Structures are given as structure tokens and as C-alpha cells.
Image (cartoon, rainbow, N blue to C red):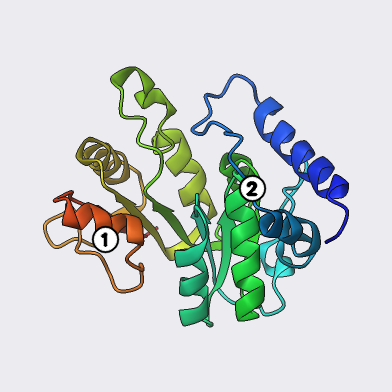
């Protein structure tokens, strides 16, 4: 195992930047300590230089084409958890490049391990605030945005922390290329209703649902163990899929 000191410094800086930048903006996430395994910590140290992406400083641009060995459409997923479904999608869709964004280091470390095991070249990960990464993208440079099961902040007084709001969607649509997609999923009906309202009222987006509401889970989104458990307990899941038309 390599010296963990460098990893600690590297990710402390990243997280501090996420927390201190733009202090007036309400964050949609809370950094929890969480237990990190020795193998995840080793992956952060040894594999992040190979598969990791560092967010540019404020005012600088993140060139998506430059971070992958092969230039092809790029899909960003925000909050990939432990990375299992994201890595599976990258494996099953070699014609696409994936950039996963996650602020919790155990998940980043686990995703790095999975990427290395599969020897994938079309996926990178970032440990940073997704808003600041979106702000660094050039217009029309993104093929798709995925947001699966974000923190629902279920208490009414915390709804202001939900990531899906008009300001967030303005950043997304600016980065999206024409015909680019936005795919979201949640198991909280109240949040699904908010997502639907926000996306419906976002200029340049068009709902692909036949009845302008939700769609059945598409095959491209893997069914997670968490979701399978929810189905067994009778929980609903709502998928939304919109495309940029202008």
C-alpha cells in the first residue's frame, strides 16, 4: 500500500474547495465521515491519478474532450454512490464517455477499484461539488446528465437543499448539446413531482414521456440492489427523461 498521507491532503483540498467556494449558495449535500476501507483508500491514492478528474479553479474551463483518450459524447452522472451502476453503464456503452461526480470518498474509492478491474477507458470520476463542475463546462459540450436517487431532503424545511431547481437546470441546459438528455430518478414521490415541475418549466427541454409525466425505467439504467429492495417493500420509483430541443 502506498503512503496515505498524499491522498488525505489531495481530497481534503478538494472537499474544502467544495465547501468554501460560493458560501452564499445552499449546498445539496453534507459531507459525512463514513468508513473508508483500506482498499478504497489505496485506490484513491494509486488510481485517482489514472481515472480521476480535478475541477478547474473558478473561471477556468473543464475541457471534457481532453480528459478521455477517445473523443465521443460525454455523459455526467451526479452522485454515483459506490459506482456499481455507473461502471456497468460505462462497460455496456463503450461508444459513450462517462464522468461520475461524487463527494463521498468511500464511493469514489470503490468506483476507482471497479474501473480498474474492468480496465475501462471511457469513464472518469471527480470528487467535487457538481455545481462547480457544471459551471466550468463550455456550452453545448455535454451529451447527457444523469441524476439517480439524489438526497430527497424529505423534511419540508430542507426542500431548499434539493439539487433540482431552476438555477441547477439553467447550468445543465447551457452545457447540454442539442438533442442532449436529462435523465433523473427518485423513489420519493414528492421529489418526483418537484423534478417534473422544474424540468417541464425549463426552456429548451422537452419531455419524452407520452403523457408528459414519467417513463418506465429504461434498460440503460441498471436496477440497483437498493431499488430492488424498494420494489419488494412496495416503494415506487419515478424516472424522468427530457431532451434538449433548442
71 vs 132: above or below? below
Q: Tag 1, which secondary structure?
A: helix
Q: Give 204 or 81, whichever is nearer the viewer.
A: 81
Indicate which label's residue lies in the foreground, 1 or 2.
2
Place residue 72 in its image quadrant: bottom right
Q: Report the side of 12 relative to 125 (left or right).
A: right
235 vs 132: above or below? below
Q: Residue at x 75, y 43 (%)?
A: 11
Q: Residue 241, image x and y in percent?
A: 30, 59
Q: Give 82 or 22, whichever is nearer the viewer.
A: 82
| Residue designated by label 2 | 36
Do the residues bearing badges 1 and 2 touch, measured as CB atoms within 8 Å? no
Q: Report the side of 99 relative to 10 (left or right).
A: left
- Badge 1 crowding class, 10 Å Cα cut-off, few under 14, some 14 to 19, many 20 or more, is few
Q: Residue at x 23, y 52 (%)?
A: 230
| Residue designated by label 1 | 228
Q: Give 135 or 188, whichever is nearer the viewer.
A: 188
Q: Residue 100, image x and y in percent?
A: 57, 58
Q: Residue at x 51, y 34 (%)?
A: 29
Q: Quadrant of the C terminus?
A: bottom left
Q: CA distance from mark 1 to mark 2?
A: 25 Å
- Badge 2 crowding class, 10 Å Cα cut-off, few under 14, some 14 to 19, many 20 or more, is some
Q: Tag 2, which secondary structure?
A: loop
Q: Residue 218, image x and y in percent?
A: 27, 69
Amino acid at each position: 500500500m502506498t503512503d496515505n498521507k498524499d491522498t488525505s491532503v489531495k481530497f481534503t483540498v478538494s472537499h474544502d474547495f467544495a465547501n468554501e467556494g460560493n458560501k452564499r449558495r445552499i449546498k445539496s449535500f453534507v459531507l459525512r465521515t463514513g468508513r473508508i476501507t483500506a482498499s478504497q483508500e489505496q485506490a484513491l491514492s494509486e488510481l485517482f491519478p489514472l481515472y480521476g478528474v480535478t475541477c478547474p479553479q473558478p473561471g477556468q474551463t473543464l475541457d471534457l474532450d481532453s480528459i478521455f483518450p477517445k473523443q465521443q459524447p460525454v455523459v455526467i452522472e451526479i452522485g454515483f454512490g459506490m459506482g456499481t451502476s455507473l461502471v456497468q453503464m460505462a462497460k455496456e456503452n463503450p461508444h459513450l464517455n462517462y464522468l461520475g461526480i461524487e463527494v463521498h470518498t468511500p464511493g469514489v474509492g470503490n468506483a476507482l477499484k471497479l474501473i480498474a478491474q474492468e480496465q475501462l477507458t471511457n469513464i472518469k470520476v471527480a470528487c467535487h461539488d457538481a455545481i462547480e463542475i457544471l459551471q466550468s463546462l463550455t456550452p453545448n459540450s455535454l451529451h447527457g446528465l444523469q441524476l439517480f436517487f439524489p438526497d430527497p431532503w424529505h423534511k419540508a424545511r430542507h426542500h431548499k437543499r434539493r439539487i433540482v431547481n431552476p438555477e441547477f437546470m439553467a447550468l445543465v441546459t447551457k452545457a447540454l448539446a442539442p438533442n442532449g438528455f436529462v435523465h433523473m430518478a427518485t423513489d420519493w414521490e414528492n421529489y418526483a413531482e418537484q423534478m417534473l415541475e422544474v424540468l417541464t418549466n425549463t426552456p429548451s427541454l422537452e419531455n419524452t414521456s407520452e403523457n408528459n409525466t414519467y417513463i418506465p425505467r429504461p434498460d440503460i439504467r441498471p436496477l440497483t440492489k437498493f431499488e430492488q429492495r424498494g420494489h419488494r417493500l412496495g416503494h415506487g420509483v419515478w424516472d424522468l427523461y427530457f431532451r434538449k430541443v433548442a
